[in-house]
Amino acid sequence: MRKNQKGFLIALCLCMLSLSGVFGVYQYRRGLSSEPQKEVPKQSAQVAEQEETEKEAANSRGAVAQADTKEKETEEAKIDTEEDIYEIGEAELAKAETQEEETAPEEDTAAEETEKEETREEEEVEETGGQVQSDRLSFSESSKLLWPVNGDVILNYSMDKSIYFSTLNQYKYHPAVVISAPVGSEVQCAARGKVSEISVNEETGTTLYMELGDGYEAVYGQLKEVAVEEGDVVEPGRLLGYVSEPTKYYTLEGSNLYFQLLKKNEPVNPMGFIE
């Protein structure tokens, strides 16, 4: 019995030792497995810190890159502006040169015309004995007319009552004067004027129209061998032509000069102006 108890105690001790060993091994392994778990948070913190640092660096790089980009854009805009200003300046310069080239011929032409006009004035001064003659025409109610041909008035101006015409054998109004003169008599310019028209009229034959200025116009009819041309400025007393044979309207009255004075296309009595 004692032997059995002793064997039981020995077995119990061995079991306890075995359990202690197993427990010790378990505790040792548990300790090894718990150490990595404690280090993981540290590694996570390091990783987070590293990521934060990288983010800050990335943000810094982004800010720098953005600043560089804005600076580049500013420089490019500045360059574009300077180039635009240069191009605009070149365009304006070319435009100004073109305008100068276009204006130059006009100025040259104007200068040539002025020179020609001065030359004509000098020639006119020489022809008139040193007196300058103006192309401007002037005539008024106080102006005077030279007697255009030597002769007597055979038909007076009459617009307030009719007068008798022998050839026509009728009475009618007369807007001019008819001055009797032999064929070939000289007809002179009664007042300074510009020849506006020379034409043939059935009633008055070859007829010369002359602008006197200020709305006045002189008409010379029954002419031949006209000595002036249209556009000529004629001075008083200059030869205009000669008395021609009368037209069929004046056969009984005989050869004559038909002389009329108009004011704004309305007839006025020339006898009130003849000296």
Image (spheres, rainbow, N blue to C red):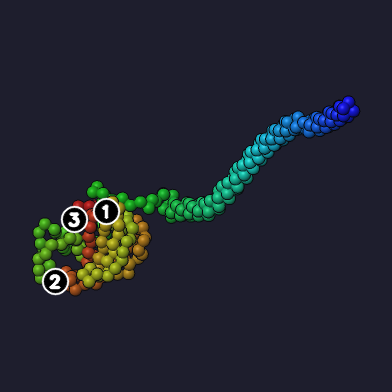
Instruction: Determine if residue 124 is in view.
Output: yes
Q: Position of residue 251 (x, y in %)?
A: 18, 72
Q: Position of residue 75 (x, y in %)?
A: 65, 40
Q: Position of residue 102 (x, y in %)?
A: 53, 54
Q: Secondary structure at mark 2?
A: loop
Answer left or right for 152 relative to 160: right
Q: Quadrant of residue 72?
A: top right
Work out how far the residue at label 2 is from the one at label 1, CA to CA, in angstroms: 33 Å
Taking 202 as reference, is 28 above or below it?
A: above
Query: What residue do we see at 80% from left, 32% from top?
Result: 26
**First in sequence: mark 3 or mark 2?**
2
Answer left or right for 8 relative to 176: right
Q: Which residue position is annotated with label 2?
A: 167
Q: Amino acid at mark 2?
A: Thr
Name the front one of labels 2 and 1.
1
Along the line of sight, the residue nearer the viewer: 13 or 272? 13
Taking 129 as reference, is 224 above or below it?
A: below
Q: Which residue position is annotated with label 1?
A: 215
Q: Amino acid at mark 1?
A: Gly
**First in sequence: mark 3 or mark 1?**
1
Q: Secondary structure at mark 3?
A: loop
Query: What residue do we see at 22% from left, 71% from top?
Result: 202
Q: Which residue position is annotated with label 3?
A: 269
Labelled disc at residue 196:
none
